[in-house]
Image (cartoon, rainbow, N blue to C red):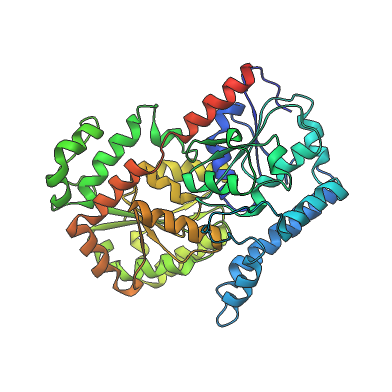
């Protein structure tokens, strides 16, 4: 265990997909750069490892199986019922545990799932900051001696995120939205245990608490998103005020679109469809595309092979870039760096939805799971996300949005409406807890 006295917390994630680990990576400053994976650490008991592996494989199978014609959607819908988020209205008592929550707690209480990990952390009981609810439940069940914090990674959450005895639980929550806060109270969590902080965003993309890097990037991005100046001309005085003068009127690069696949590598074919629809503009250097393969070498190869099949080999490394890394920390680093040159994010409404707070408009693919449906609704509500239209006609509808200034407006709505200081707020609360 890392016992550096300058570390304020143990930051813990589950290495399954990107969402929970991405949030933890952005908080690694609290832990001296070291993030623990509860399902992958040296010395993990085989019984614990087996439970985690079964969960991971099932999740990845279901996520990919959703794309199977005819039966895929039905099968996924059946699975999603176990983790679905109930209708918000009418506001009511929702403290009764669901089947998913009961099964999770049974594994912890009967199988002692996670006890070994919590015992290790208890040797140095600093505040525990987890980005996955199971670890927080483990800590509470096995008597962790430090404070327990849980980072919520979606705009709304299922009953599984709160204990079956939420009204007496020690777990404190960092939530990204007002809806998530209200939902937790419906599950029985005490109001004093809920902090509305926003999602933890990378400091590499926000800069200081004055958002210096974010404002500079957004000032450049707006000129690319609004080359005709329709939006900028109308709101120029206000924009210059909010961006501390960082506002350009003329584009400095081709319009740059980032397409990101999910942690299970799903929806990769959409990325190729976008390239196909925009290949003329790519060759003419009017558009750039960043294809995010993450840590999936098979996805990276797929992108490369399909680009070559389209006759665009010479564009690889020029107007088309592929982000691939051998591990998640390296991927997150490369991803964050690429955001500085990105104008539009095209992806499913995962935890990345909160990156709209960096002043990024979103084109949204179909959500996978009820939590992503809620994320999509949140993006649409604040005006920074739009559902994708016909991919084969991307060159038409996308540039209509650019010419009208709508994407520039969406970028500003994301910047203004979504919390962008989540990392700083979380750090301040945890550091104060540690000093006490």
| Residue at 79% over, 39% down | 141
In the rendered view of the protein, which quadrant contains the C terminus? top right
Q: In the picture shown, does residue 339 fall above or below 364?
A: above
Residue at the bottom extreme?
70
Q: Quadrant of residue 43?
A: top right
Horizontal side of 71 relative to 108 (left or right) equals left
Instruction: Say how many tags the image has.
Output: 0
Image quadrant occupied by the N terminus? top right
Residue drawn at the location 60% of the way across and 62% of the way down:
84
Residue 13 seen in the figure: yes
Foreground of the two, 77 or 14: 77
Residue drawn at (49%, 36%), measured in percent from left and top? 197
> How far from the left and from the top, in percent, is residue 74?
60, 77
Residue 305 shown left or right of residue 139 in the figure: left
Q: Residue furthest right?
A: 110
State left or right for residue 231 relative to residue 176.
left
Instruction: Tell me residue 170's x, y (percent).
Output: 70, 34
Q: Position of residue 245 (x, y in %)?
A: 20, 31
Res 327 visible: no
| Nearer the observer, 411 or 277 | 411
- Which quarter of the picture shows residue 7? top right
Image spot of residue 94 (x, y percent): 64, 54
Which residue is found at the position 54% from the left and 54% from the top? 91
Q: Nearer the viewer, residue 304 or 139?
A: 139
């Amino acid at each position: 265990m890392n016992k550096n006295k300058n570390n304020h917390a143990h930051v813990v994630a589950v290495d399954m997909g990107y969402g929970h680990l991405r949030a933890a990576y952005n908080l690694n400053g609290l832990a001296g750069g070291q993030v623990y994976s509860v399902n992958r650490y040296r010395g993990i008991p085989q019984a614990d490892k087996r439970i985690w592996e079964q969960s991971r494989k099932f999740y990845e199978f279901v996520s990919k199986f959703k794309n199977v014609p005819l039966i895929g959607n039905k099968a996924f819908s059946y699975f999603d019922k176990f983790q679905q988020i109930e209708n918000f209205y009418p506001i009511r008592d929702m403290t009764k545990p669901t089947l998913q929550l009961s099964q999770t707690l049974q594994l912890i209480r009967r199988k002692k799932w996670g006890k070994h990990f919590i015992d290790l952390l208890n040797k140095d009981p600093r505040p525990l900051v987890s980005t996955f609810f199971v670890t927080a439940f483990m800590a509470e069940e096995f008597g962790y001696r430090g404070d327990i914090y849980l980072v919520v990674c979606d705009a709304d959450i299922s009953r599984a995120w709160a204990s079956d005895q939420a009204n007496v639980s020690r777990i404190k929550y960092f939530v990204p939205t007002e809806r998530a806060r209200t939902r937790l109270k419906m599950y029985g969590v005490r109001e004093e245990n809920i902090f509305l902080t926003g999602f933890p965003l990378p400091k590499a993309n926000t800069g200081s608490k004055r958002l210096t890097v974010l404002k500079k990037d957004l000032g450049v991005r707006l000129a690319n998103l609004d080359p005709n100046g329709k939006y900028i001309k109308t709101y120029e005085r206000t924009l210059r005020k909010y961006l501390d003068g960082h506002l350009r009127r003329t584009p400095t690069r081709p319009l740059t679109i980032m397409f990101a696949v999910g942690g299970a590598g799903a929806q990769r074919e959409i990325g190729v469809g976008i390239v196909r629809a925009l290949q003329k503009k790519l060759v003419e250097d009017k558009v750039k595309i960043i294809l995010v393969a993450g840590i999936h070498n098979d996805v990276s190869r797929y992108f490369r092979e399909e680009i070559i099949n389209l006759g665009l080999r010479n564009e690889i490394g020029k107007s088309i870039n592929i982000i691939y890394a051998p591990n998640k920390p390296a991927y997150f680093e490369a991803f964050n760096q690429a955001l500085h040159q990105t104008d539009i994010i095209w992806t499913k409404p995962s935890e990345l939805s909160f990156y709209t707070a960096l002043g990024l408009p979103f084109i949204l693919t179909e959500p996978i799971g009820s939590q992503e449906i809620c994320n999509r609704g949140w993006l649409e509500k604040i005006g920074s996300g739009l559902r994708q239209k016909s991919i084969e006609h991307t060159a038409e509808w996308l540039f209509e949005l650019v010419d009208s200034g709508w994407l520039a407006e969406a970028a500003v709505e994301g910047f203004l409406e979504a919390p962008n200081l989540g990392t700083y707020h979380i750090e301040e609360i945890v550091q104060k807890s540690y000093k006490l």
